[in-house]
Image (tube, helix red, strand yellow):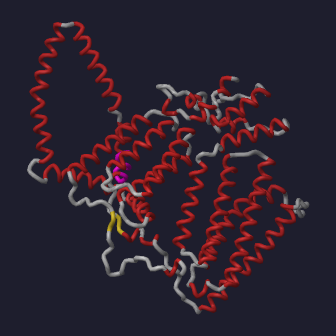
Amino acid sequence: MNADNVSLPILPADSAAPVIGPDIKKEPAVRLLRLLAGLIVIIATFDFCFWGIRDLGFSVAVFCPILAGVILVNRESRLKSTTKFMLMLLMGADLAAMIETGLTNTLVLVILMIVIAGDTFFNDEEKWGRWLSQGIALIRVPGRIFWLGMTLLDVGLGEGFGWVGSFFALIFLTVPALVLLLIFGSLLASGNAVFSHWIAAFFNSFWEVIKLYMNFERISLWCFIAFLALPLLHPVNVSAWWWKWTLQLPRFKERVPVQAARLSSGLILVMLNGLFLVANIADILFLWSGQKLPSGVNYSQFVHQGVNSLIVTVLLSAIVLTTIFQQAMSIVRRPELKILALAWIAQNLFLILSVGLRLDLYIQAYDMTVTRLSVILFLILVASGYALLTIKIIKDRSLSWLIGGCMLAIFATFYLAQFLDLNGWSANYNVMRWEKDRSHNLDVGYLHELGPAAWPALSRAHQDDDSVQIISDDPRENTPPGSFTSKANFDSKHWREWSARAWMNRWALEEK
């Protein structure tokens, strides 16, 4: 039995689409209080960790576990097994943030927060449904603000005076105490110079705090964080229509006779196999064997300019194969089509290797950069996607299975990449090449942009050439003096920007 024949629960066309998510028709006071407290904690933590810093660092590693904890505190059910696993992944991503916070690490943390919130507040049996529903809830975030306002108004006015009455009662009970405190405080201050000095210092400090926090930009940031955090703590109901496609995507209907569809698909695969064969033979002759290029073709065109086009070609090939094998089973089960498809996959994998070789030759001719290292990782990811596509074709797996597998492969690639020191690898490679061949130009400006990861490499270059600066003082560069050195200091002023990598590489600054 293949995956496409498995009966899965699909909603009848005439039935009302059920919704998943918390019941918000009437909020218990405890749940509402927990939600408001959670928003206050998130806003206060975000302000404490990020307001006024120049760059992300250790503050990310502090904020994310607190955000996850607030999400879990607001749950109404037991932790799911997937939630526990995601919390373990969060611990690893948080460790990566301590080492060095970057775009990849930040993206991984955002995805994990969405997944954890989806597992916490949605109870659908399918994990993909829970995660996708949470993503849809984030898109519909504006409605949550109106919901919260209406809920608070309902609580305040729904039964008698409710919270509104309690609030005014609290003010009424507090006023006499405040009046007496003011009277006796004034009398004591007028008769005790030390006490008067303390009172004056207290009010001066209090006024400075008020001026510090009563900042329009800061208050706007608080509102924006509350705006984003609300659907993570109490997402909107999401219709099953948004996620039921993850169970199984239907195959294309037979709009032409089966024989005609088989013939058309076969012709496509035969012709494209032939075209790719000619292109791969050209790579074997002139790229892999190193023969002299034909007249009219220069080295830069052959090696560098073709990389982007070939990557698009490989991706387009995967889309075409997926489309062909999403046809009816009566069409795609033919072994001839599968053999042609596997041959084309093999040619695409060889094309990926050729793209990698082109990239390697270009790095040898010029320099290593983080972008070029990222392209290598991307090629590995594409190759893994072709492996999943091969399994789909051989075992007749569904398109939903293929999409889910690709999503997991993408996340796994990003998760592993956050631990890789791509900046340091690039800097070490470039300095090593320069040490072997001084005629090769060393792009010191680019190394400065790589930050603390490049300090050891720059220190080696500085020992050989005093003109190479470890920390740039050139105002024309995008790295002003001191922009990275604060990351190496874990103190009361710089702890939020601190990174373990900068701290471990600080010896390079001390030896310059």
Examine the structure image and report whether residue 226 is included in the region drawn in magenta: yes
Please provide percent x and percent y for residue 297. 85, 61
Q: Quick one: quadrant of the C terminus? A: top right
Please provide percent x and percent y for residue 136. 40, 61
Q: Quick one: quadrant of the N terminus? A: bottom right
Relative placement, left or right, of 447 versus 44 is right
Question: As rendered, which of 263 and 474 lies closer to the eye?
Answer: 263
Examine the structure image and report whether residue 482 is included in the region drawn in magenta: no
Q: Is residue 243 above or below residue 5?
A: above
The total number of labels drawn is 0
Q: Is residue 492 above or below residue 285?
A: above
- What residue appears at the point 29 percent right and 16 percent down from the top-left corner? 201
* Snapshot quadrant of residue 396: bottom right
- What residue appears at the point 36 percent right and 80 percent down from the top-left corner? 12
Relative placement, left or right, of 217 versus 257 is left
The residues colored magenta run 225-232
- What residue appears at the point 18 percent right and 11 percent down from the top-left corner? 189
- What residue appears at the point 68 percent right and 67 percent down from the top-left corner? 314
Please provide percent x and percent y for residue 79. 38, 55
Relative placement, left or right, of 290 versus 363 is right
Question: As rendered, which of 114 and 316 lies closer to the eye?
Answer: 114
Please provide percent x and percent y for residue 347. 74, 70
Secondary structure that dominates the magenta span: helix
